[in-house]
Amino acid sequence: MDELPIRTGDDVVRVRQQVRVVAAKTGLSLVDQTKVVTAASELARNALVHGGGGLARVEVVTSALGKSGVRIGFTDEGPGIADVDLALTDGWSSGVGLGLGLSGARRLVDEFELTSKPGTGTSVVVVKWSR
Amino acid sequence: MDRVPILKIGTTLFVSIQIDLQDESVVRLQEDLADELAATGARGVIIDITAVEIVDSFIGRMLAMIGSISRLFDAETVLVGMRPAVAITLTELGLSLRGVRTALNAEKGLELLNGRA
């Protein structure tokens, strides 16, 4: 498992590059690699901009049926999200951006789990399976 | 932070993005292009993204804004060379890039700007 800090814009690029390497190794198609790297880019930026920085964990996982996939966990210790359902709505934005980052990232992956409470930071775990 | 170079050929500004774009680089490109448009009076901008592996919502929004900014300088922006996987991902993400014209490659983009397409 690779742990990558997210403290600067360069770190966001490094997270993308690492997810690309692991997704390719896992056997994801080029389109699926592009989708998961794009989702990772959105979530890493969220951790940086809204969470004040955080950590990304990238690993290869295997499903019960023997499929392989890439799992990425993002954690930050920012202010957290008060209304998770609202934050996952297309077009909802905290003020910067189009409000497509979180909702768009969810559409690009196979599994998406967001845990957050005000004051305790945010954790997002996504998985993209090879087909 | 890496900067993206801008080339002026005739009345067209050419930008070929060859780096892994971080947010600051795209914002800088936007500012540099506005300065170049004001200084040169160029009528068109071609942005080549052949080498760009992902366009996320931030980068996409910045590219669309470059289109809007160019129009204020009476110039048109054409985005060329988008990879198929990027096009599929952008669409699923929900980004339509309204306001920016697209062409298959730089040659077709130039034809579009010259009114021959």
Image (cartoon, coloured by chain):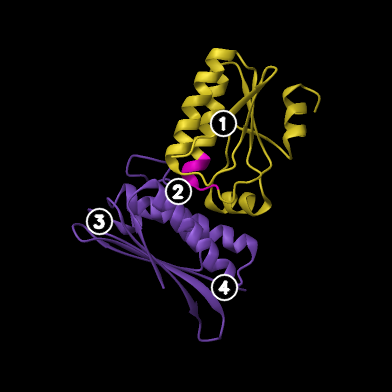
Chain colours: A purple, B yellow
Amino acid type at circle 1 is Pro
Tell me the chain of label 4.
Answer: A
Residue B66 vs residue A124: left or right?
Answer: right
Task: Say few, some or many: other residues with alpha carbon within 10 Å of mark 4 (under 14 / 14 to 19 / 20 or more).
Answer: many
Residue A26 screen position, x and y as percent: 57, 73
- The residue carrying pointer 2 sits among few (fewer than 14), some (14 to 19) or many (20 or more) residues within 10 Å by Cα, namely many
Query: Please, what is the dominant secondary structure of the magenta stretch?
Result: helix
> Quarter of the image containing the N terminus of chain B?
top left
State which chain disc 3 sits on: A
Residues marked 3 and 2 touching at CB (< 8 Å): no
- Helix, strand or loop at label 4? It is helix
Q: Chain of mark 2?
A: A
Sequence-wise, the earlier of marks 4 and 3 is: 4
Q: Position of residue A41 (x, y in %)?
A: 46, 53
Q: Which residue is mark 4?
A: A26
Marks 3 & 1 on one chain: no
- Which residue in the structure is indicated by mark 2? A100
Label 3 – label 1 distance at C-alpha: 38 Å
Rendered location of residue B55, percent (x, y):
55, 47
Q: Nearer the viewer, mark 4 or mark 3?
A: 4
Residue on which disc 1 sits: B5
Point 81% across, 24% down: residue? B116
Q: Quadrant of residue A113?
A: bottom left
Range shown magenta: B55-60
